[in-house]
């Protein structure tokens, strides 16, 4: 009973996180990890978990939480015709290979340098995306570069717990995929990233000695069950909001969110 009472303040914060994660998943095509990872990182440390273990648990729990959110978001985007099926069919296998590789690395090597590397890439992509204008005609690179891009997308996304949109949206925009279609397709990428990533974290991840009650592998089930229902409920709301925004405005909103995420990750990794 005492443990339940102590968890209630965290549960309220997790509920708000679930709402925000669902809205962002639908609005920007991200898996909700932009919100989940920093909040979970803070909560797990407040519960007495070491910072490195807290980041690993935040990543694992975020990936697990993105599974139902991604399903809800993809269904809403697909109904609006925002998912490029051709790109998805070409990329998903190589995204999956990158996800499995990145998941194993996270479970075996808990290093701050993974976070630093991704934070720097996120900041670079955010600046480029904010300044770059999408061309009128979609132009995809040669197949070899598409496969390499898909692998890197899966690798970096799963190591940071941020889902498919964080890199997927600016990457597709770089190939002149229209903004709303880039968001919808990236949401589908998030589905491929979340399921195998979360499974590896559950099976291969070793729970820290100071992990809170209800932790399996690197996934904390109480936090997961608090956030997920609300994220599912609000993902379609985010899709409706995104449909009302102009394409260029949507890109700039995403770029700002991505920049804030990169800064947050860099500061946490450096212990500032």
Image: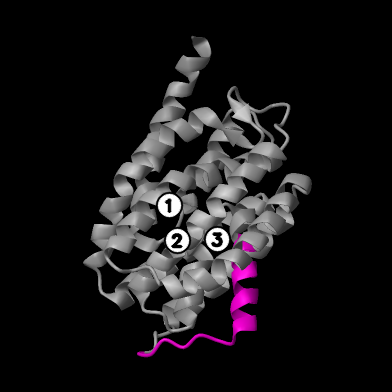
Residue 78, by quadrant, is bottom left
Q: Which residue is mark 2?
A: 188
Colour logic: one colour
Compute the Cα span from label 2 to label 1: 7 Å
Which residues lie in the magenta part?
136-156
Q: Quadrant of residue 230?
A: top left
Q: Mostly what secondary structure, the magenta segment?
A: helix
Of the two numbered discs 3 and 2 in the rendering, the one whose residue sits closer to the viewer: 2
Q: Is residue 238 magenta?
A: no
The mark nearer the N terminus, 3 or 2, is 2
Residue 15 image point, x, y percent: 38, 35
> Would you call the spot at circle 3 few (<14 residues within 10 Å), some (14-19), or many (20 or more)?
some
In the image, residue 17 sits, relative to residue 211, either above or below, namely below
Q: Quick check: 103 left or right of 225?
A: right
| Residue 181 located left or right of residue 89 | left
Q: Return the residue found at the far left.
A: 244
Residues 82 and 251: in front is 82
- 3D distance between C-alphas at marks 3 and 2: 26 Å
| Tag 1 near tag 3, CB within 8 Å | no
Q: Quadrant of residue 145?
A: bottom right
**Element under label 2?**
helix
Report the label total.
Answer: 3
Residue at mark 1 to residue at mark 3: CA–CA distance? 25 Å
**How far across and how far down the image is residue 272, in percent?**
63, 51
Disc 1: which residue: 70
Residue 142 included in the magenta stretch of the image: yes
Circle on res. 263: 3
Residue 272 appears in the rendering: no
Report the residue at 28% width, 61% height from top: 79
């Amino acid at each position: 009973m005492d443990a339940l009472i102590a968890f209630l303040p965290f549960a309220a914060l997790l509920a708000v996180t679930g709402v925000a994660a669902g809205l962002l998943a639908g609005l920007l095509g991200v898996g909700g990890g932009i919100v989940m990872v920093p909040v979970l990182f803070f909560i797990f440390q407040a519960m007495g978990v070491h910072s490195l273990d807290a980041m690993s648990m935040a990543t694992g729990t975020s990936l697990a939480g993105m599974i139902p959110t991604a399903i809800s978001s993809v269904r809403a985007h697909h109904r609006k015709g925002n998912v490029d099926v051709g790109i998805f069919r070409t990329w998903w296998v190589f995204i999956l290979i990158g996800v499995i590789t990145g998941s194993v690395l996270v479970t075996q090597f808990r290093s701050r340098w993974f976070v630093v590397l991704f934070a720097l890439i996120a900041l670079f992509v955010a600046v480029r995306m904010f300044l770059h204008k999408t061309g009128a005609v979609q132009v995809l690179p040669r197949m070899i570069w598409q496969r390499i891009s898909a692998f890197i997308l899966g690798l970096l996304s799963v190591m940071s717990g941020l889902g498919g949109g964080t890199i997927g949206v600016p990457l597709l925009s770089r190939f002149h995929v229209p903004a709303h279609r880039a968001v919808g397709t990236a949401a589908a990428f998030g589905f491929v990233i979340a399921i195998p990533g979360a499974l590896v974290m559950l099976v291969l991840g070793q729970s820290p000695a100071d992990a809170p009650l209800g932790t399996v592998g690197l996934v904390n089930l109480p936090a997961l069950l608090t956030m997920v229902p609300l994220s599912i409920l609000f993902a379609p709301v985010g899709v409706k909001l995104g449909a009302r925004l102009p394409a260029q405005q949507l890109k700039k909103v995403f770029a700002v969110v991505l920049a804030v995420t990169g800064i947050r990750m860099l500061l946490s990794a450096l212990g500032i």
